[in-house]
Amino acid sequence: MSNSMLPGPILVVDDEPINLAILRQILAPEYRLMFARGGAEALNLAIRHHPALILLDIQMPDLDGYAVCRALKADPQTEAIPVIFVTSLSEVDNEEIGFAAGCVDYLAKPVSAAIVRARVRNHLSLVQAKALETSWRDAVVMLGKAGHYNDADTGTHIWRMAAFARQLAEQLGWSKARCDLLELAASMHDTGKIGIPGAILRKPGALDAQQWAVIMQHSATGFEILSGSAAPLFQLAAEIALYHHEKWDGSGYPQGRRGDAIPESARIVAVADVFDALTMTRPYKEAWPLERVITTLSAGAGTHFDPSVIAAFQACLPQLLNIKADWNRHDSPEKGAARIAIAQQLMPPGPILIVDDDRLTRAVLGHILERDYRLLFASSGAEALALASSDHPALILLDIQLPDLDGYAVCQALKANPQTETIAVVFVTALSDLGHEERGFAVGGVDYLVKPVSAGIVRARVRTHLSLVHTGELEQSRRDAIDMIAKAAHYHAPDTSTQLWCMAGVARQLAAAVGWSPARCELLELAAPLYDTGMIGIPDVMRRKPAELASDELTAMKTHTWIGFEILSGSDAPLFALAAEIALYHHENWDGSGYLKGLAGEAIPESARIVAAADAFAALTVQRPDQDAWPGERALATLRASAGTLFDPTLVAALETCLPRIRELMAAWDQPEGPVWQSS
């Protein structure tokens, strides 16, 4: 992990200078470090500099490590900082005290460089995961918000309805994890309204038959935007979007499904949606009295609604009214979205495979983990490889000394097989010398547990590595959400999709050419496709108009930069802060002739200048139904002619230097599967 991605330095705390020197030597090449020789000094530095991680000695002359850790966890300014105790082997016997005080792991003295680096890397990855989870949640919120941008009179309907759906699912016996997913997915139920003309969505009177036919398309449109992701969240959201207007008696749309053929998620959302719609005030109607709402919903059981969901509604009505009352006190989409629960597991976790030829060791590890996880057991290397291929565990605890294949050979075989190469392997062994550790990491292990094992440390390490598995899934889900927002913004111009992603790749190359760090280049590639998010708020009649726009239409069209900023801003995540900046400023021109603010030169954020150049280049060089692709040299000549007026001259020069790499990107886009996301 690069220093540029860390929120703060690593604080190393020990009263022995030799221990500080050893840890400095191990970590200084990769991380920013701070040092303290006592507990009081450590607390002071933690408050002032907010480190990303603390490596903390236990035996110190003023405050011991336990007291320091408790003080850190008691202070809201420092409670989230992970603490790893670095202590002698004899003190690991007191690990229960440390975990109770709030530590996340232990490092035993004398420290192993490989182990220190691995543990630090793991826990800093988890720090990043928290920021990633917030960013992912914000992306989901934006997707829901975008779906209702042209239907703004619904106010907080989507967030409140999602809370109602969760309560109904709980009443029906759904697990907590699945209720978490439903609450997030339900907010996207009307994403397909992005594809419906605003004149129909906002029509104050009744819709005619032709208009109803148009609005009924929004369920299929929502499915089209949300489907295609492997993440259960978006699979559930796509399912709800497609089926939430089906009716129990088969009279709904789009497929006329009936009864249990309608997914339960959609049946739940249908009730939650109507309950909220009837009990809220809109510009064109007053809220209905509660008695009338209850009567109407109950009367619809067996025709419009699933009778079991209506029974659940009646059973949990007091809880639903409490939710409604709470929303009435905090009627804000932003506050509501912040309260949406984040699903702790995006993918159902695989089992943990315990591999050891000693029956007692298998029993001990099983006893430690069985209450929290599904477990598989193997007593040999061959059996372990077979189970890994057939059951795809999330994590393997692997002994080294096995009767057939040793643990190193098993790990090498796992990493050589595409079906099992991503499974995390933690060695559990009595072989604790430096050579064995280095060999274990070399063959692909992610950590070591030394026998005899400690229950607290086993649980901590397993929890850490399963969280890291979750982080990978979370990153993919976030990228899927970004894809969906960009796809939604360009829904009425699907022929631009290839251009959009190609533009992002070109923007990344340009940023690298002018000196951006790899991490920030990757962030730009993720943010760039969201640059036209504001087109969601522009009437489709303007977006599709073949002729030149009238003056008032052009003025309205220009507001898409502000609309995009409005949808994307409000998140603390650097990704969306960058995306909002690009959305607002990507139509500014170098000479000040652009919009919205008429900024000129370096007053325009560099991110927006990069995307403007990349967008123009991609628009000219990508094949579209209405335009043949230009050769790269011709497109570059066109941009060069506008350097100093439309475009930053430095970026046009940079485009010329990285044209060979851009040609490779364009060739990749010509492949049927398209390019894959790059990662730094």
Image (tube, grey):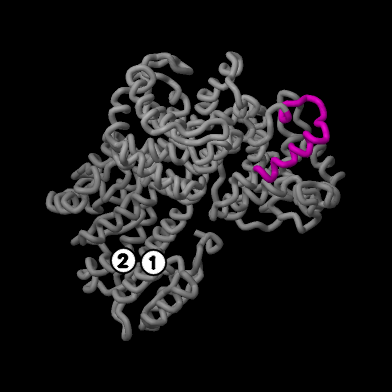
Q: Where is residue 626 in the image (x, y as percent from the top left)?
A: 75, 24
**Pointer 1: what residue?**
79
From the image, give the main secondary structure of the stretch colored magenta: helix
- The circle drawn on residue 102 is 2
Q: Position of residue 247 (x, y in %)?
A: 40, 19
Left or right, residue 596 beside residue 575: right
Q: What residue type is labelled 2?
A: Gly
The answer to whether residue 430 of the structure is visible from this angle is no
Q: Which residue is drawn at 21% across and 61% down?
A: 454
Q: In this view, does 147 lie above or below 120?
A: above
The total of numbered circles placed on residues is 2
Q: Residue furthest left?
A: 360
Q: Which amino acid does label 1 sit on?
A: Glu
User: Label 1, label 2: how many angstroms apart (C-alpha)?
Assistant: 9 Å
Q: Which residue is drawn at 54% across and 55% down?
A: 572
Q: Which residue is drawn at 31% across and 66% down?
A: 102
Q: What stretch is highlighted in magenta?
A: 542-563
Q: Where is residue 70 in the image (x, y as percent from the top left)?
A: 31, 72
Q: Which residue is at the front of the view, 338 or 671?
A: 338
Q: Which residue is at the front of the view, 339 or 36?
A: 339
Q: Residue at x 66, y 43 (%)?
A: 563
Other-residue count near label 1 (Cα within 10 Å), few / some / many at <14 / 14–19 / ≥20: some
Q: In this view, does 67 lie above or below 651?
A: below
Left or right, residue 606 beside residue 75: right
Q: Of tags 1 and 2, which is closer to the observer?
A: 1
As helix, strand or loop, the secondary structure at mark 2 comes to loop
Q: Does the magenta stretch include residue 558?
A: yes
Q: Position of residue 73 (x, y in %)?
A: 35, 68
> Closer to the N terminus: mark 1 or mark 2?
1
